[in-house]
Each structure stands twice: as C-alpha cells, then as structure tokens.
Amino acid sequence: MAAVSDNDIIARLGKLSISAPEVLKHAAVSGGAEWRAELDKAGKAGVPLTKTLLFKPKQPKSAEPTPVLVIAKEETETSSGAIGGALGLKDLRLANEDLIKQVVPSAASKDDVSALPLPAPVPSTLFVVLDSALASSSDAFALHLTSSASTVLLKGTEIKAYLQSLTATPDAVRVLDFAELKANAPAPVARAPKEKKEAAPKKEVPKKDDDLYEMAIQYKKDEDFPGWYTDVLIKGEMLDYYDISGCYILRPPSYHIWQDVTAFFDGEIKKLGVQDCYFPMFVSKARLEKEKDHIEGFAPEVAWVTKAGKSDLEEHIAIRPTSETVMYPYYAKWIKSHRDLPLKLNQWNSVVRWEFKNPQPFLRTREFLWQEGHTAHLDKAGADQEVLDILELYRQVYTDLLAVPVVPGKKSENEKFAGADYTTTVEGFIPTTGRGIQGATSHHLGQNFSKMFDINVEDPNADRSDPNAITKINVFQNSWGLSTRSIGVMVMIHGDDQGLVFPPKVALHQVVVIPVGLSKVEGQNKTIYDACQKLADELSAGGVRATVDLRDGYTPGWKFNDWEMRGTPLRLELGPRDLASKSALAVRRYDNNKSSMPLDNIVDSVKSTLVDIQKSMYENAKAKMDKHIIPVTEWKDVTPTLDAKNILAIPWCEDPQCEDDLKDRSRAEAEAARGQAEDSKAPSSGAKSLCIPFDQQRFGPFPQGEKQCCPQCGKKASKWTLFGRSY
Amino acid sequence: MAAVSDNDIIARLGKLSISAPEVLKHAAVSGGAEWRAELDKAGKAGVPLTKTLLFKPKQPKSAEPTPVLVIAKEETETSSGAIGGALGLKDLRLANEDLIKQVVPSAASKDDVSALPLPAPVPSTLFVVLDSALASSSDAFALHLTSSASTVLLKGTEIKAYLQSLTATPDAVRVLDFAELKANAPAPVARAPKEKKEAAPKKEVPKKDDDLYEMAIQYKKDEDFPGWYTDVLIKGEMLDYYDISGCYILRPPSYHIWQDVTAFFDGEIKKLGVQDCYFPMFVSKARLEKEKDHIEGFAPEVAWVTKAGKSDLEEHIAIRPTSETVMYPYYAKWIKSHRDLPLKLNQWNSVVRWEFKNPQPFLRTREFLWQEGHTAHLDKAGADQEVLDILELYRQVYTDLLAVPVVPGKKSENEKFAGADYTTTVEGFIPTTGRGIQGATSHHLGQNFSKMFDINVEDPNADRSDPNAITKINVFQNSWGLSTRSIGVMVMIHGDDQGLVFPPKVALHQVVVIPVGLSKVEGQNKTIYDACQKLADELSAGGVRATVDLRDGYTPGWKFNDWEMRGTPLRLELGPRDLASKSALAVRRYDNNKSSMPLDNIVDSVKSTLVDIQKSMYENAKAKMDKHIIPVTEWKDVTPTLDAKNILAIPWCEDPQCEDDLKDRSRAEAEAARGQAEDSKAPSSGAKSLCIPFDQQRFGPFPQGEKQCCPQCGKKASKWTLFGRSY
C-alpha cells in the first residue's frame, strides 16, 4: 500500500488542525515495558500507552484478505473472539509479518505496527477498530509513528479524528466498547453500523446466485458517496490501488476512455494546425524556478530526483508539474521570425504533483495523464480565437463523448490560472454532492511568459521609416489542458447502485452477449454458445465493440450482475427460445429497458440503440444539472440553496474581494445553520465562483435598474455568475 | 545544456581508464594567485596551473551563438585575435555571464568556467580549443572541476583524451600552437582541419542563395557519421538538445513517426486481444528490488525521487526503468482463475534509465518512449505463439512503415533478456558503420516471474481424483517492447548528405508544394500562390499529408534545400509554365528523380508515386544490407570481413563461452591489425552475436559433415548465426 513517512503523518495531523503534536525519538522498543521505560526517561512517566494489533480472519485462500487493525489502550483486553463476533468475522488470528507489511508497509517488524502510517484512503478491505476508552478521551496517549523508535502524544479524540480522516466515511472507524463486549461474551453482540460482509472469494467457483450479494457494490451512491465511488471503480475494474499513495493503476476500461478522448481531440486539434511533440519529463531547478509567480503554486508539490543509481546528482532535477517553463525557452530559440508563427504544439504526457491532501482516484492523483497545448501567436486576436476553439472541443469531449453536461464560461480573477491574462473553463456538476467540478481549462497567457522568456520577433507590420520605433514584438501565448480527471467526473455522474454506467461512445465493450436458458446436461449447449459467438462476431464485424461471455461455471444471473457492475451499455441475452423466435433480448444498462430485438439486421438495431442510449444519458444528465442551477438574487437564499445541493447563478459584481467575502460568509452561515461544529462531515465549505457563463441568456433577463445589484456586496452587478461548493 | 556534477566527471574519467584522479577541495579562488596559494597549502607547490576561457565571436544577433572554449597553460598567451584567425571567426570577445551559464551550466561565476563539466556530446556550435603545450604533455596539470573550490590533477594527454570523449569526433578538439600563432600574427594562419563556418543567421532575412551553404548539413555521412547524425536531426527539426544531458525534445516530425507506429501496432495487438492500460511511473524500492537477477542490470541506472516540495520522502521512490516488477504483483492479484487467462496488457509510456555512458539521440537516452506488453498464459504453447506474432508485427513496423530491413531471429544465451527463457529480436544494420542494431525484442519469460510473484491458478486440467496431485500452476509469461530507438535507425539508414530522407508512410508532410518562376513585381504572383494552395488543398482532401510553402522572402532554391533537409518525400514545383502546361514538376527526395506530373488526376499520381518511393526505399536498403551480410566459415576471414563493415553469418556452436571468446579474439585481432592502440576512434570492439535468424535458408546450405564446425572453437556448429559489431 503506502510508504507514509513520519513527516507525512505530521502533515496529515496539521490538516486536521492538530498542529505541532509532541514527538519523542528514543531507542526502538519491543513491548510495553521497554516503551514505558523510554517514556519515563523522556519525562513522560504519566502518559498512558496504547497498543496496535493486526488480526486476520479465517478466509478461503483465494479470497482478498480482510484484516482488522485494532487500536486500544494498553490495558484493554482485546479478545480476538469478541472482535470477530462484533464484526461478523470468523476465527481472528494475529497477522503474520507478510500481511503486516502489506497493510502497514512502513513497519519493519510487528513492534512497529501503527495505525498512523496507514494509506489514505484506507482500503475498503481493512477494518479499523478503535477502543472506546480512547475514542472519547481528551487525555493524551502515546502512539508509535512509523517505527517503535518514535512516539507521538495525541488526545483520544484526536486519534479518532485522524483515523476518520483516513477512511472513506467517518463511521468506517468502528468504535468498540471492549468492556461491554467482554461482559456479553460469548454471545455475539450487536453488529457495528455499516459493517461489511466478509469479502467474497473472487470469481473462484462462485457458481450459485447466493454469491451475488458478495460481489455487489457495498455502498449506496446517495448514502455514502465516497465509499460508493471507490467501490464501483475497483469492482468495475476501472482502476486499482497502488502501493504508492496517490498513484493508481488505470486498467483497460478507463485507459480505453482516454484513448477515445485522445483520438477525438487529437484529430480535431490537428485540423486547427496543432502538431504533437514530446518534451522530457525532467526539468532543471533553474528552469523550473525561472517564472516565480507561476511556480509558486506548484513548488510545494514538485517531486525531485536527487539520485541516479548510487550517485547523488549535484543538481536536483524536478519532474514536470506542467510544462510552461520546460517548453518556453525553446520557443524563444525556435521562433526567429514572424514566419515561424503561429507555433502550435501539444503533448500527451503525464505530470506529477505530489499533493499531500487526501488523494482521490482520477480527481486528485500524484501522477495523472493529460494533454497540454502551448501555442504562440503574432497577434492577440488569433490567440483569443484559439482559446475559444479549444474550449469548444473540450465541451464536445464532455457532452458528446462522456455524455456529461458542462457550462462553458470564463473564470473570475481569483480563479484564473497563475500567469494567465484570463482563463476559460467548462464546468461540470455532481448532483449527488451538489458540487461543481472544473472540467478543462483554456488559458490566454497574453505576453506574460513571452516577456519573461524573450520570445519575440520583428514585427512585420512595424513602421520601418521611423528609426526609433520599437520593432520587436513579444508573442501572444495560450495554454490549454484536459486530464484523466474527466473520467472520474463521468463515473460520478452516470454510475448507480449497481455499478458503473458507460456511455456507449467510450465503452471498452459496448455490447455483451450472454447465453441463457442453458441445459444442465454437459454438451447440450453448443448450439447456444455457437450462436452467441456468431452474434458477437457479427457485431464486431459491423463496427460494434462487442464481446461474448462464455465463461463456464457462472450462472446467467451472476453474469448479468457482473456486466452491470462493469457498466456495459447493452446486454443481449440469447437462449433456445430466442433462437427459435430469431431474436435476442436487449437490456439497456442505464435505464434497464428490455426489448426483443430481431436477429435479422441486428447490427443496425444495436447501433441505433447505442445512439439512443448515448443521447438519452446526456439529456437526462443535462436535465438533472439544469434543475440544480438556481438563479438567486437575494442573499437570504444563498446558503439554503447551496445546502439543498445546488449551484447558484448570481448577478455578480466581479470584484475579487466580494468573492472572498462571499466564500467566508456562506461558510459561516452553513456552519451556524448546522449548529454542530463537531460534525466534521456535513459540508462546511463556502461557495466559490465556478465561471461566468458565456450563455448569459439561459438564466433569464439580467436584473435591471435598482435590482441590478450583487446580493453579497450590493455593488452594481455585471454578469450572471455560477457559484457553488466545488471539488 | 547540462548539469554535470563532479561525480559525473569522475565517472567519465573512469570510463577512459583514468581512474582515481587526484581531487583537492579548497576555498573558492578568484584568479591564479589565490589558486596557487591553495595548491601550495595542499602540498602541490610544483603543479602547473591551467586557465579556461570562453570567447564569443561577433555575430548577427539572431544567429545561434558559436562560442569558443579555450583550455591553456596559465602562462600561455591566448590572443583572441589569433584564435579567431585560426578558426575563421570575427572579433572574439570574452563571453558574458549569460553565455557562460549557457555553455557551462554548473559555473556559478566566471571563475568556475571549466571544460570538464561540458555536456556530452558537446554541441556542434561550440568550438573546443586546446593549447598544444598541454595536449601532448605527460605532466600533471591543475584544472577546476565544476567550481573553483575543487581541483583535479590530470596529465595533458588525459585532458586531451577527456575532451575528445565529449566531442562528436576526436578532431573536433582543435589543438592550437599559441606560440606559433603569435609568431605568425597578424596574418591568418592555416585553418584547423574540419573547421565549421560561422553558424548562419537562422531564417532571419536569408533571402539570397548565398545563404544556402550556411544552412546546409555541415558533415558528410561517410566521413563523420556522428557529426552528420546530430546535424541532420537538429537541422531537420526532428529533435533538439535539452538542458539535461541525455534528454532530448522530440519535435513534430519525430513524434509523428511515433504516432504512426503507435496507430499501426496498437491496432494490430488489439486484434490479438491485447488491452492497453497505464501503470504509475513510480515504483517503491521494495517492489523494484524484489526480483534480484532482473533488477541487477537496471540498478545502476535507476533515477530516485527522494523529495517532494521541501519534504524528504522517508522511502525513496524509483522511476520505472521497465515495468515487470511494477505490474506483476497485480497480475498475482487479478489472476484468480484460469478463466482470467490469457491476460494481455500493454502500455504506451516512457521509462527512465539514467545511463552514464555517452548519450546519443534516440539510441541511448535517459528517458525514452516505448510500448511494453506483458502477457500471462495458461499454457506455454500459447505464450510461444504470441512471442512470434508480436515479433512479426515488429518486423512489419520496420519493413513496412520505416522501410528498414531487419532480420528476425533468436538471441543467444548471452544476449537474451535477464529473466527470460528466450528472447526473439529483429536486427537491423547500419551500412555506414557496418554495425548491427537491435530493433525490438519479444521475450518468453517462462515461469520465472510467475514463481517469484506467485502468479498461479488452479489447473483446470488437473486430475482431481488424486488428492495428492499438485493442482496449482504458475502462468507462462511474455514481455515485448519497441521504442523510439526505431526512429534513430530509420534516420541512420535513409538520410544522406542533404539531410533527412523520410519514407512516405511516416512522413509528417509527404508532399510539399513550392511556387517557382515568380515575378519580382509585388502582387504579380497571386495566381501562382493560389494555384499552389489549391493543389495542396486538393491533395489534403485526397488523403495525402501535403503542405505548401508560401513563405515570403525565401527563394525557391532556398526552399528546395530546406525541404530536402527535412526529408519530405515528394516536392511539387508549380510556376507559370507548369500552369500553362497543366502540370507540376515532381521531384522525389530519395533519388532526386524529376518528372512532369499532369494536374489532372494528380492525387492518384501522387499516391502511386508515394507507394513507389516507399517500396524502392525499402528495396534499396534491403539490397544494401544483404550485400553486407557475409557468410564466413573460416576464422581467418572473420576480422577482415568485420573491418570491411560487414556482419557475418557463421555456422555457430551456440556455446556461450565460445561467444565470449569470439568477441575477445576478434577485438584483439582488430587492434593488432590496426597496429596503433592510440587511435581510439577506429573500431576496436569485438563481434557479438546479433541473432540466430529464423530463416536459415538465406545463407545457403548449412555445412555438412567435416565442415560442420564452428570457425571459432571447432565444435560442431548448429545454426547460421549473425555476428557483428553493434550498437
């Protein structure tokens, strides 16, 4: 899982406003007595100790392990039987070293086991159990950091808050009253809320429909969105967690989306005269730091290479967080004359931003794939036009490929890209959380970088009769980017409680053919199997991305669920009765619509069904978004409308100070309305501007006369502007 | 340019067998007197000092600077006028700090200027001048390393050898006798051999054909192959040097090739059931080092990330040098049953191998683009078949896209991939140097990795009636990769003294239309310009990648040369007379064939011409390769045949020891034949095996009976095997 360091832990605590916790370094200890002695030496005689234990239930060997990590006061009796009973797990045993390493990679031995260096988020397969004697205590306790040679002192409540910050939901940290458990033993006690069943043996001999429950998505989208999101991604095989925190494996269904996006967008920008290239992933320190304002935002997240083999590099080398300062020195070299303009380059690459915030698949990852376009123009008008041409392509990627509605517009001064004259954006909306999400951005950089990097040419239009005229002109530049974040947005919008739902245009498999009505007699099903294969082949030959599921040992019901979880847009069921009637049963994933489809001319029927599905998915998502964009003209309505999971269209003054005030004011009101500052989970963030939509007409006539004032500050409003909580 | 460290310099010296040179650390010095004092303090009173000076000639502002670095004994009078005279450069002046930083990035001030940390290879625009008083001396001299606070003691001959190791050719280091220069001043002395003209002002006002010489390729392919190679790549805008040594910028013409290769190969492997995915570029230390044998070869070249922002990472993280150990732990997790097999994944990514050898564009770079396929199979037969299927696709990439002939075959035991059961390869040949070059490899890994990473399934064919039978089976794996190295091979084979020559299938621009016969009267040329544009549009609409060169201020002759240098396969010239005769003049790049082409139906004519060019280029290259693969059955012919720039087909015994012996013996013979061990430039390497070709018939009947013996060791020979010097 993760290589979390002591520094990472301190940083995480800092984010929870647990600043400067007391850290002690001492000799490595084995067991409580040695530890006690070390703490006594350090003048911490009175501080109570904790213990952290890793258990493993008895499971089929082929099953994913579902270990249990218990954090308790040292003196608490942590009976493995009682814990197992409370969690519904069989035969807990202390984990072996292999499993310890897997769960807590920083642990060099069992004495180093600690909950603090767990990866964030904690894998859904790990149970985290906290002793109730710790959970509500405001006393400070001693815990190990990443090794038994370091101790941090934390209050019981801080330990709880810390653990909750690592898990998908706060109640994924199970608080157990061991005293009560002991009193009630051996009878099993009431189960902890939201417990999960033991993980199913993955696909190994799951022949009965009884297994269906085991493989299904464990969370409801509306009840536990973060848990649901992770679960659909993993079970739908979009991605897998990686042993370096914040890095994820893009499995074929998600990489396929990226290839579809690439094929479309790359084809379109080439029509605009853009050429692809590839710059090195490395950037020297001097280059990276040349444009101070620009790099300021990235500096804390830059990953540095300092060693090669066993040699220390004299000069540290950064991995690009973005390529402005990588590319523009060469633009200065290559652009010698106005004849070399416009220069329009794009690259498809990965960039690294080593964020210390909680990572989230696709949305916040330390390495991500994107394209970055960087163009230079002789005149501002040409650059301005391109900014919009590219934004229009981004809109098409979202609406036409991903079936995701977006609002194109301009960013406020506060929200524009560091170093840009202005930023345009396509903004999406996640109905489940009521939050806005930035889809892709296209920036006009003006001459900011060209002045810094000396990218200039002789102005061909300069008046050469005047010997004093300045004839050098700095070029006008744009940069624009779209990343794999788009995939996460698509999943969040279309997925449901059964799993992923893919729009047909970007589905790795658009259609799956499944044999049904099978005989239990061996060898009786060849006709059906052959017909299924033939149907899939026919579809493939017709240009449909089709597959057939002839796996032995699975019931049709199990397969239906499996392919639903994977989000395959259309399922065709084919059995003896279907064959007799020369038709197949077509089941649409996104609305579960079922219809009989004649086998004659089925390629065309399937194709038009896929077009229908794509269109309907977009229209449904669009209607849902539109319903949640609420024009608000009076302040009293702002926070209640946000709290009802909407984004707002406000007649706004465009003043940066007003935006800051609006954010603070809406946050304060939200917190007050909730009235319970301790419930850290309810939304407490304020609203920020998402964009000033280009289409101002959609919100109706702009307020006129006396009513034309900003609801926040009262100054004269200029534009309908979207505000909301956001990702 | 490059961030070369003291350690890098020591490593470079080590490669030249100048081991453990004496290094002194002391206070930073400004000037000879302070330095003298520091050396005296260190007990080095007698050691003579050197000086290193950077000059810049007077040049047009828009021209690429061509600075001159002079390394001389401290007391030598280094007159800038005399140096300029010797090099044919005007008005040499000491360079300013900006230029110093550009040439020697490690120099913090002018006192730190040193030739030792120059990038390798030294850019062709930099003149390196060595005082003859140093060049031939076996005394030790004091030189600064990367700063004036460190000194290394080197013999004069070692300084010379070191400088020559950095430059494209040994005589690029100009040895000047300053005493003689002074004696002959002020009259210009004879020019040093192989000098280059001052770099031309790049494209800025190059209106006259006089400029043609300036922009042309400065080296002859047959005379100075390394210089030629770099020059055609840079001037043809395939690539540019980067300020981190060993990293290069892939400009659109080279990235375009890669996209064409990607489109073809990705389409084909998908037909074989391979899916694309993306694994993180980072790999934890523990994972990387899990398979010891495998990693041993890569370990010295692994780049390590140890810092993020200002935080030190507790666990260092590697950048993947290849992905076996990155991916296979997940194969173990994902492959639960035989139903999950075969698992066939591929990724398009970049990998990093921080080589300390001299980098070479495309052929040896620290970051390179490639695809790596990794597949797992239930049975060996399926895996074996795939190895060959993939190799056949690699052959097609080379022969059908790049017009490069290759020999498919199997690697010897010595040359196979670490961790593989066997390796197959397509081997190319560079006629100019007579060296073989590995094109791409497809490996069968057997069960080596699956045992290490526990990738296994229940054998569906196991006899379940026997309770003691072992029913787990480790999967059979393959891996296969093709990199951007292929682009370098293509350039080396097809380029000529005029520049690049592209095969049409991978040319960014297949056709360029150039207006000719223009009037000097402003505005008189609109008809021609319009006709050229129309012709290019017509070709584009017809599916030809065509462009038109309507740049003002360039003569047709200048444009012809420019597009020839860029390797554009077909040039169409269109002028008033052509228009009158409804035809264009078509000029083929690769053989300079000229013909008149009617404008009627020109799209078809162009397309068939492009097909012809592609075919002829391949056939010519193939004939050239075939001529240089010489069957040799007696030892006496081995080295002479190698020295005549051939590769050999030998009836070989396949004994690894014999291969080692053959290499040593052929090296020793080559060295003896040359008889001058000091000429480090002539080929001194021995021959190694390139492959055992699958097509054994091409070399004629295999020797039988008594003649069936290995010419090296005399043991019984088994297969025709290619041996040669190689890249």
Image (tube, coloured by chain):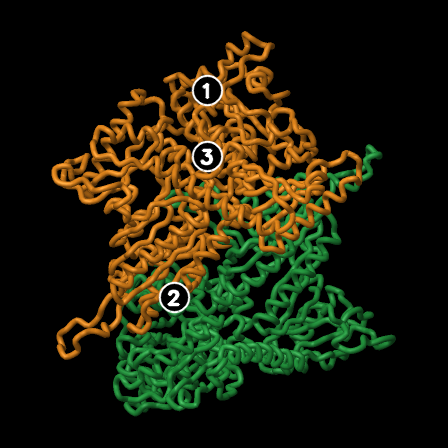
Chain colours: A green, B orange
Q: Do the residues at pointers 1 and 3 share their chain?
A: yes
Q: Which mark is residue B49?
A: 1
Residue A165 makes an appearance in the image: yes
Q: Which residue is drawn at 64% across and 83% down?
A: A644
Q: In this view, does A679 lie above or below A334?
A: below
Amino acid type, label 3:
Ala
- Considering every residue shown, the one lying at the far top of the view is B183
Q: Nearer the viewer, residue B184 or B469?
A: B469
N-terminal label among 1 and 3 = 1
Residue B718, image quadrant: top left
Q: Is residue B411 above or below residue B82?
A: below
In the rendered image, the quadrant that contains the C terminus of chain A is bottom right
Q: Where is residue B327 in the image (x, y as percent from the top left)?
A: 36, 61
N-terminal label among 3 and 2 = 3
Q: What element carries label 3?
A: loop
Amino acid type, label 2:
Gly
**Residue carrying label 2:** B273
Q: Is residue A535 above or below residue B659?
A: below
Task: Specify few, some or many for label 2: CA neighbours under 10 Å numbering under 14, 14-19, or 20 or more.
Answer: few
N-terminal label among 1 and 2 = 1
Q: Is mark 1 on a helix, strand or loop?
A: loop
